[in-house]
Amino acid sequence: MRKLQAGIVGALILTMAVVVANAQEKAATTKATSTSTKTTSTSTKAASASVTGPKSIIGEVIDPACWVINGAKGEAHKECAIACSRAGQTLAILERKTNKVYILASERPGEDPNKPVADYIAQAVLVKGKVYSRGGLLAIQVQSVEPAPKNAPK
């Protein structure tokens, strides 16, 4: 009889431990989700993109990683930029007048943002498109691209 009572008491203690552990896990998950939602909500507000609207940019099509790290651009870097683009590196426009870099952005997920400028790598171009700014980063959705006018200021 004592063994049976001890077994029942042991089973009750084990059951209570499992119930308490599940309750603590649920409370922690709820708190984490609540905190995550608040953080996401706050960061979304703080990091919302500003659209500066349609803009024309005269600049060079560059590989931004090589430009930032090594200052690489121009004809001497053309083959490397082409290889990086084919490997999946998103290209950018280095604005001639301001030296600002505009990362290329596609309008829909999965689209190749490099496609409109692929034939102009390491060349001066006139790009028209919608410009976005967030957290100090500039991006452009290219609507049209053509060689830069010969009389464009350098």
Image: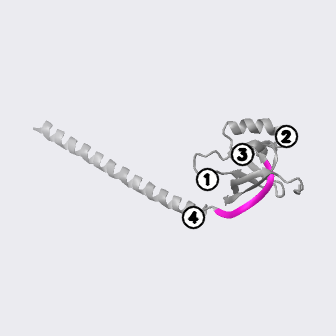
Q: Is residue 93 above or below residue 75?
A: below
What stretch of residues is rendered in magenta? Answer: 50-60
Asked which colour scheme the image uses, the reply is one colour
Would you name the residue on which mark 3 appears?
91
Circle 1 SS class: loop
Q: Position of residue 90 (x, y in %)?
A: 68, 44
Pointer 2 or 1: first along the chain:
2
Tag 4: amino acid: Lys
Would you name the residue on which mark 4 appears?
45
Pointer 2 or 4: first along the chain:
4
Would you name the residue on which mark 2 appears?
75
Tag 1: amino acid: Glu
Pointer 3 or 4: first along the chain:
4
Is residue 114 visible to the viewer in this orientation of the structure? Answer: no
- The residue sitting at 66% across, 47% down in the picture is 113
* Label 3, label 2: how far apart the Cα atoms are: 15 Å
Tag 2: amino acid: Glu
**Rendered image quadrant of residue 118:** top right
Give the foreground label among 2 and 1: 1
* Label 3, label 4: how far apart the Cα atoms are: 28 Å
Is residue 118 visible to the viewer in this orientation of the structure? Answer: yes
Q: Position of residue 61 (x, y in %)?
A: 77, 47
Disc 3 to disc 2: CB gap under 8 Å: no
Q: With 77 as the anchor, is 50 left or right in this view?
A: left
Pointer 3 or 2: first along the chain:
2
Closer to us: 62 or 108: 108
**Rendered image quadrant of residue 1:** top left
Prevailing SS of the magenta stretch: strand
- The residue sitting at 78% across, 57% down in the picture is 57
* Label 2, label 4: how far apart the Cα atoms are: 42 Å
Q: Position of residue 64 (x, y in %)?
A: 74, 46
Would you name the residue on which mark 1 appears?
107
